[in-house]
Image (tube, helix red, strand yellow):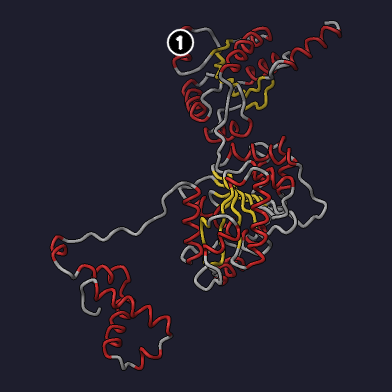
Amino acid sequence: MPVSEQFRTYVEGVRRRQIRAVLVSPNESVLDEVQAASDSLIDFKLIRVLDSYPASDHLLRLFRIHVPDLLLLDTCCFDAAVSLLAAIRAEAPNVIAIAVHHDSDETLLRATLRAGFDDFLTRPLRPETLRDCMDHCRGRLGVRPVTSNNTDLVFSFLPAKQGVGTTTIAVNAAVAAGAVDNTRTLLVDLDLSCGLVQFALKLGNRHSIIDAVRMTNDLDENLWPQMVTSLGALDVIHAGALDPQARLEPVQVRRFLDFTRRNYRVVCADLSGNLEDFSIEVMRESKRIFLVTTPELPALHLARARHRLLASLDLADRVALLLNRGGRNSLLTNNEIESVVGLPVVMQFPNDYKAAHEALSEGRALDRNTPLSRQIAAFANELLDRKAHQRPAITKRFIQYFTLVPARYQLAALNGPRVQRRLADAGRYIMAGTSTRFRKTDMKTRNSLSRRFFLGRAAGGAAL
């Protein structure tokens, strides 16, 4: 072929959409024939060649990563081929499946089409046969392109200032989300200046987010597991060692997010708060941006400034305020905090330095029995649109509808034996009015016991 004609053929191939295919065949001769025929096609590319029938989850992972247009599947083992096709259809219903036959048996061809294959090729495979098949596939892809099931559950955690506990919330929210029905969750530390996820979870992986973002175009089912550390259903990728010269391009970060959204149900990004270009790109791709603050005035001032900046970037409708270390001892009420920042508080987390310190010391998530962990678990359920576990209602017996006793028993059942005894003691001490033990208790406890005791009496019972 003359050079000018070869160049013309190349240009036409570039102008047309390239079809990306995966070939699966345990037959070496079929692999050789398909690869030889594809070498002459400029607009056709075999992105993966598998020389055996893989496990369905492995093939699904490959499709989520590469999103091919075409599956060439050898039907020498018909049942195995049909099983793989069914798994792929569930993940990517628009992918084109081509069966590769070893003969032109009419019964086999009919069974192939009934099984859900879109077309078939018979051996020997020639370049012109493959080209005709690709032209037919290209017309179909123009009408029904292959799409992947990208998640929209991408959440950014943005600190109002350093030290407000953003990493603690992000890490434990990701752990809690992964614990809900083994939801595939990814935690990404994008704080290149002082990322703490590696320290918080004692991660030893030498690869970081910088490596993963820069190698996005080369990530596959073999390279990606080396980039992350798996903790059950949660995968974590840390920010790496401190490097003042480290930079990430927004375009690279966007491609990286596209990759992660195809492979995970939930993606949590722990940001630095420096509002780098790539951080803004992440927030543009996020469903919600959680602005984390504490009740202190400097943190609230900076939270308001960040909220205004995000509003100027047309991101105000995605921002939600998380109040960390709040509680009754806070000098500002939630209404005052909301008026300062200009956002409603969607979730408040208690101050639990001891639990956080123990978790950091041991390189693990928070103990599930702590109040802070329970609140973060409820927050994770909200992220997944799940209802948090609620205490079952007490079922009344028929006779209880005709007596004043039920309220008293309900109060006792909810509080448990230890509080029952305390309420009973409080009742006796209050009625006596002269108990040394009751007078020595602190004022807060006395007021609480007195209030609950008289509520129980008002509900219709004697002192517990």
Please state the horizontal and vertical placement of residue 202, each as a whole percent of the image.
65, 60
79 or 171, nearer to the observer: 171
Residue 229 visible to an observer of this rendering: no
Q: Is residue 420 above or below residue 105?
A: below
Image quarter (top left, top right, bottom left or bottom right) of the C terminus:
bottom left
412 left or right of 19 in image: left
| Total labels drawn | 1
Residue 144 falls in which quadrant of the image? top right
381 or 3, nearer to the observer: 381
Q: Residue at x 38, y 78 (%)?
A: 448
170 left or right of 428 in image: right
Residue 445 visible to an observer of this rendering: yes
Q: Residue at x 54, y 71 (%)?
A: 330
303 or 225, nearer to the observer: 303
Please state the horizontal and vertical placement of residue 66, each as a whole percent of the image.
64, 31
Please state the horizontal and vertical placement of residue 429, each as a whole percent of the image.
30, 88
Q: Which residue is tagged 1?
A: 110
The outermost residue toward the right is 3
Image quarter (top left, top right, bottom left or bottom right) of the N terminus:
top right
55 left or right of 300 in image: left
Q: Please, what is the three-letter code of the amino acid marked with disc 1?
A: Arg
Please state the horizontal and vertical placement of residue 203, each as a whole percent of the image.
66, 57
